[in-house]
Amino acid sequence: MNNIIVMKKNSVKNGRMKYNVLIMLLICVITSASCNGQQKQAQVGSKDVANDNPKVEKAKKDIVGCIKELYAVIAQKKEESTERFACHTWWDTVAAVEKKDADLEEIGFFNDDLWTQMQDDNPDDFEVRDIKFLQMDVEKGTALVDFVLWSSIQTVHQKFEFCREDGDWRIHNIIRYNTDSDGKEAESDLMREMRNYLAEFQEEATELTYANMEGIYDSLDENMNSESRFCLNADGTATWGMIGSLNYTEYTYTINGNTICLRPKDVDSEEDCYEYDKDTRTLKNEQGAVYYRQVVE
């Protein structure tokens, strides 16, 4: 009987030991996963953000110095001296936008100061605060820095993308923060917006040709279903027909500016002319018939 009691006690004791070992193993696994997750999170986007070696520290010091010196120059009303703070790509893009807007009567792309976002004169009491390095790669020569620009007039939150050019750290892009109606901050990538703006300008400046007008143009009913269709070909010919019908009319067409005039083949008939609107991608004649350019997948 005593032997049975001893065996039961040992069994309970061994069971508790196994339970404790399992608990310890589980804690180790969770701790390890947490540490690994934190390490991976710290490495996202940049390998040098948390690095404190002399090369990285010097790069950070140079970048902070670039930001502070830039706003010191602006505060001293020496905007003409800001050229050295940004890279060639940045200034080439800015110059292209300013050239596009040179003859505009209304306000163009830039409605405020490039560096301060202010529409009136800049103050002379700028202070750069809360600088944070979000990305950093010294070998590639790239960095992303978040900071707050304080002044007696307004406070601006923005990011600078940096690149290393001609041996110096220079600003390559500005990412602005705008507060929406809900009080939330929304990012605005200035380089991307400038390039999109210039791309729109290039599309507007492109003359209509047989090659770039080749495509399918449909008229739509009140339910936005296709009713009839023009097919413009790159060789200056065209066809028209009702959707679902095997019958069609053949045309030749000419282009004069934004006007496309179609004349039926082998028929003595007047031309039917349409104005092409690049914004809506439509053909519209004097009678009000509208044909929408279709996107072919």
Image (tube, grey):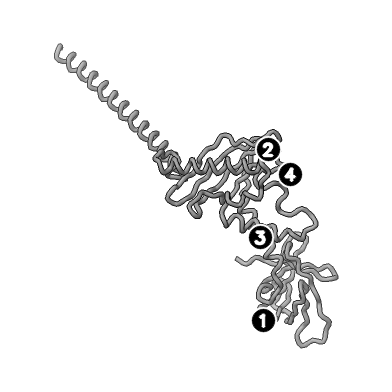
Q: Which residue is mark 4?
A: 119
Q: Is residue 63 above or below residue 231?
A: above
Q: Nearer the viewer, residue 58 or 265?
A: 58
Q: Which-is-in-front pick, marks 4 and 1?
A: 4
**Which circle, 2 or 3, is nearer the viewer?**
2
Q: Going from the N terminus, do you reach mark 2 or mark 1 first?
A: 2
For mark 3, give the secondary structure.
Answer: helix
Q: Are marks 4 and 1 in contact (CB under 8 Å)?
A: no
Relative to 47, is 209 above or below? below
Q: Check the image and report above or below for 29 versus 80.
A: above
* Residue 71 locus on image (x, y percent): 62, 41
Element assignment for label 2: loop
In the rendered image, the quadrant that contains the C terminus is bottom right
For the residues bearing labels 2 and 1, Cβ distance under 8 angstroms? no
- Spatial CA distance of label 2 from label 3 is 29 Å
Q: What amino acid type should be assigned to the residue bearing mark 2?
A: Asp
Question: In this image, 65 relative to 194: left or right?
Answer: left
For badge 4, the amino acid type reads: Gln
Q: Nearer the viewer, residue 252 or 128?
A: 128
Q: Are marks 3 and 1 in contact (CB under 8 Å)?
A: no
Q: Residue furthest right?
A: 287
Which comes sooner in the sequence, label 2 or label 3? Answer: 3
**Which residue matches tag 1?**
235
Disc assigned to residue 124: 2
Screen quadrant of the N terminus: top left
Spot occupied by residue 267 in the image (x, y as percentages of width and height): 79, 86
Say what secondary structure mark 4 lies in.
Answer: loop
